[in-house]
Image: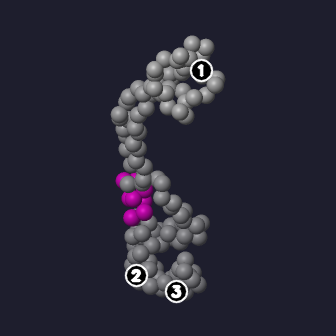
Amino acid sequence: MCSSKQVHPILLHSDRLNLDCTFSEKVIPCLEFSMKFQSNQLIYQKEYTKRQQVIYLLIHHLHDREGWGYKKISKWLNKSFILTHTGKKWFSSSVISVLKRKHERDLMNEQVRNKHFPSKVSKFEVNYYIF
């Protein structure tokens, strides 16, 4: 007669039953832990097109180096048949917007998107699984 050890019916496999009616079981230790990480680079960011970069550099040069006002820049762009990225004519507000948005985007990349967050590892424990 076998020992009175309670065995789950699912565990009754012929390859684990020994001649003396005991079961051979493998105990495997497993290290388990939790890991938390954070990144601001998981959101897709569309890059500026070459055209947008050239227009920004042109507006930046005319405003900062040449000292032109927004209205003068918008009139010059329209006279030069240079349209906005949406294919419309320029206004002083759209010139302001190009400079402002580029500055905001650069700040966001520098301060938020490229910010480093340390990873946190916790809840270390060794659990034993019987197979």
Mark nearer the viewer, 3 or 1 = 1
Q: Residue at x 38, y 35 (%)?
A: 121
Q: Residue at x 54, y 62 (%)?
A: 47
Q: Main secondary structure of the magenta part?
A: helix
Q: Examine the rendered structure and indicate whether residue 103 appears above or below residue 39.
A: below
Q: Is residue 115 left or right of residue 44?
A: left
Alpha carbons under labels 3 and 2: distance apart: 11 Å
Dot 3 corresponds to which residue? 89
- Comparing 108 with 81, the one in front is 108
Q: Is residue 8 visible?
A: yes
Residue at horizontal 36%, vertical 38%? Answer: 120
Q: Label 1 neighbourhood size at 10 Å, few (<14), some (14-19), many (20+)?
A: some
Q: Are marks 3 and 2 in contact (CB under 8 Å)?
A: no
Disc marking residue 39? none
- Give the tally of numbered discs: 3
| Mark 2 or mark 1, whichever is nearer to me | 1
Pinpoint residue 114: horizontal percent, then vertical percent. Answer: 42, 50
Magenta residues, as a range?
A: 104-111
What residue did someone put label 1 on? 17
Question: Which residue occupies 45% across, 73% down?
Answer: 98
Q: Which residue is mark 2?
A: 93
Give residue 95's quadrant in the image. bottom left
Quadrant including the C terminus: top right
SS at circle 1:
loop
Q: Depth check: 96 or 59 in front? A: 96
Name which residue type carries label 2.
Ser
Q: Is residue 127 above or below residue 42?
A: above
- Residue nearer the viewer, 95 or 47: 47
